[in-house]
Image (spheres, rainbow, N blue to C red):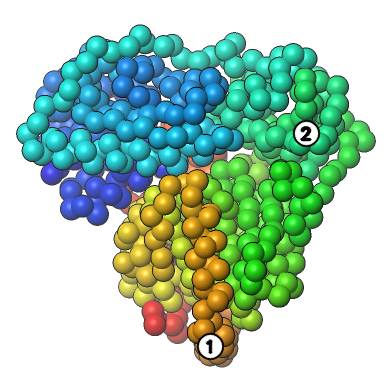
Amino acid sequence: MRILLIASAFNSLTQRVFTELDDRGHRVAVHTAPGARGMREAVRAHRPELVIAPMLTEVIPPEVWSAVPCLVVHPGPPGDRGPSALDRALQDGVTEWGVTVLQAVAGLDAGPVWAAERFPVPPGAGKSDLYRGEVADAALRALRTALGRFTAGERPAPGPPGPLRPLLRQAGRRIDWAADGTGTVLRRLRAADSRPGVRDTLAGAEWYLHGGHREPRLRGRPGELIATRDGAVCRATADGAVWIPRLRPVRRPGERRPVRLPAVRALALAGRLPRGLPEIPAGAGPVPDGRAWSEIHYREEGPAGFLTFAFPGGAMDTGRCRRLLRAWRHAVSRPVRVLVLGPRRDFFSNGIDLDAIEAAADPAAESWSAIRAMNDLVEAVLTTTDRLVVAALPGNAAAGGAMLALAADEVWCRSGSVLNPHYRRMGLYGSEFWTYTLPRRAGRAEAGRLTGRALPVGAARAARLGLVDRVIDAPPEAFAGEAARLAAGLARSGRLQARIAEKKAARERDEAARPLARYREAELLRMRAAFDDPAAPYHALRAAFVRREGADRAPADPLAPPPEPPGGTPAVSLPGRVPEKR
């Protein structure tokens, strides 16, 4: 079919729907420009047989839904209506929730139902993590059912809609630190973790708090800051304490939209970081109490080691790259035969932290620092030749984060993962040894197409292209356990030692043909050109992405050609003597 996706952004769910529909042979167009006029023009231009709205914060105009069937994905069960469905569900502490695919009509979320799916809400999941995981899985199942019914000529099921619940505003998210227990505080923080955050007063200033994790031991006077770790601050509740990873200042009149930063850095930049707060290190090795939160953990199960990490938004600034590199060096000092790298849930990595760069006094210098730190980490993975390395992707990976995964010997991803192995939509040539690892896996021609077209790749297609070695069909909460089971089997394999010897010999041959240092130097030369040029597209694109300044964005159509990075198009400028896919 000719299908038009109308979305407020080409976000994770929209990308996942796009990749699945494209894989199934549908002709898919995507429209992301806001406003009724833009929707009407998109329908006239593409003449779709069906419109799907995976994530839309606006109302589809009557001229559109009366002319062509429009299926809307609502992140709530049948009868739930309103723009804060997932926020309210998490704040209320539900243990089960749902997704509904309904037809657009005059009333908001009031149309007949084409399909619905339910899913368990795992304890501790934040809104954005749940949205990219269980919600997205349920949405895809419901869309498959709805498409099957639509093509079979069936009719949607009518039903009386429930009451329309209004937008959950800050007054309904407020935390009373003197009275609210840890459970209540965490529900409010997790229901707003990525957007909009919880508005609060902290250290004498107004902030939006983003994210929250339980602290099992530390206590203090309710509301006060009592410690720091991994850039987060620990704040006492009425009966315990929580870790708050990120803060965003409340915007003053006339200011540009501030960016989210690690809480310690945000407070320090504002001159609000209390003196004498103890830093409680997590350490590179196993954390003494497995319940204690930290961004990086290491554990062992027999002959397999697991280096897990979880960075907000999958973003890695200079400090995170260096901490993960120190943890990697600890892990490779351990007597394990298989080393698994990756988080338990959600993002693997999206590469360098654009928020941290945008907030830096010198964004060019911070960009340079972060990309070199990322390169150091990827190089350490590439040059680990005395054991087998597995990158385990429970969620999405993009740009340098995708290349970090490709540095491993095997890449395992969850069936719901989406990869964006390119950089051009941020106006960059790319680094992290992509000119070595991407052609090595996908072949020179396909590497050019992937980086040149700059479109998302679903798990199934990634496996067909050779980017992924194993697709694990498991719900988000079960992925880590299944990956651990497979890693244990790999570690007991009779061929493991031979494989390690083969990979060491292959790395030596590749090094002799073209040293890794030459790949790094050539890539960084082009990256430096973009960083140091104030007129390069990278700076405007980064600011628009981070600050959500729509007027300065790249083309509204995410399928349009991305901007040209300085130094030529990656699709036609791969260095010579790149090994082809074996």
Circle number at residue 212: none
- At 74% across and 63% down in the image, what residue appears? 326
- Label 2 neighbourhood size at 10 Å, few (<14), some (14-19), many (20+)? many
Q: Residues within 10 Å of mark 1 (few under 14, many from 20)?
A: few
- How much space separates mark 1 and mark 2, taking CA atoms? 47 Å
Q: How far across and how far down the image is residue 346, in percent? A: 51, 46
Q: Nearer the viewer, mark 1 or mark 2?
A: 1
State the image quarter where residue 329 is shown: bottom right
Position of 159 relative to 130 (above/below): above
Residue depicted at 64% across the width and 15% down the height: 174
Where 577 sits versus 524, above or below? below
Across and down, in percent, residue 516 comes to 58, 79
What residue does disc 2 label? 234
Q: Secondary structure at mark 1?
A: helix
**Of the image marks 1 and 2, the number of the one nearer the N terminus:** 2
436 to the left or right of 198: left
Label 1 belongs to which residue? Answer: 498
Element on which disc 2 rests: strand
Q: Quadrant of residue 327?
A: bottom right
In the rendered image, the vertical position of residue 233 relative to residue 493, given as above or below: above
Q: Mark 2 belongs to which amino acid?
A: Cys
Furthest residue in direction right, as rendered? 276
The x and y percentages for residue 91 are 55, 22
Q: Is residue 75 visible?
A: no
Q: How many marks?
A: 2
